[in-house]
Image (tube, rainbow, N blue to C red):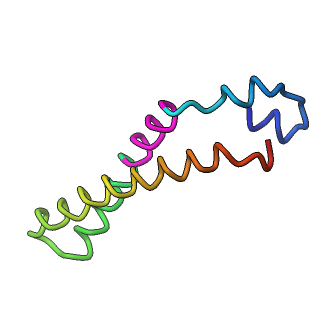
């Protein structure tokens, strides 16, 4: 759909409205947070040092939950924005 927008293809209102359902935002949020949390875990472990995997895991766990909620809210707000559609 993005390539169609960039290429200037016309889409209907129905296609735009149905393109991003809440469940899609949830799945995108979870999949992105898995990637982001692995990154946070590795970075936290490297910064905290060896033997501190428990603390690095705690940081990654809190990060996973808070950023998934923020990402979902961000996606839903942008889905309401008509600019660029």
Nearer-the-camera pick, 52 or 10: 10
* Up-down relation of residue 14 to residue 25 (above or below): above
Image point (47%, 47%), residue name: 72
* Up-down relation of residue 39 to residue 19 (above or below): below
35 within the magenta span: no
Instruction: Give the residues in magenta.
Output: 23-33
Q: Where the C terminus falls, by quadrant? A: top right
* Up-down relation of residue 42 to residue 46 (above or below): above
27 within the magenta span: yes
SS majority, magenta = helix
- Percent across and percent down for residue 10 are 89, 29
Describe residue 50's horizontal placement relative to residue 38 as left or right.
left
Q: Where the N terminus falls, by quadrant? A: top right
- Percent across and percent down for residue 60 are 26, 59
- Percent across and percent down for residue 3 are 78, 36
* Residue 6 sits in quarter: top right
Image point (70%, 30%), residue name: 17
* Up-down relation of residue 4 to residue 35 (above or below): above
* Residue 9 sits in quarter: top right
């Amino acid at each position: 759909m993005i390539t169609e927008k960039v290429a200037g293809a016309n889409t209907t209102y129905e296609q735009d409205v149905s393109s991003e359902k809440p469940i899609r935002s949830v799945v995108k949020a979870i999949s992105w947070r898995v990637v982001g949390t692995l990154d946070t875990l590795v970075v936290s472990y490297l910064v905290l040092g060896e033997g501190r995997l428990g603390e690095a895991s705690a940081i990654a766990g809190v990060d996973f939950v808070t950023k998934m909620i923020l990402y979902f809210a961000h996606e839903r707000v942008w889905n309401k924005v008509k600019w660029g559609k």
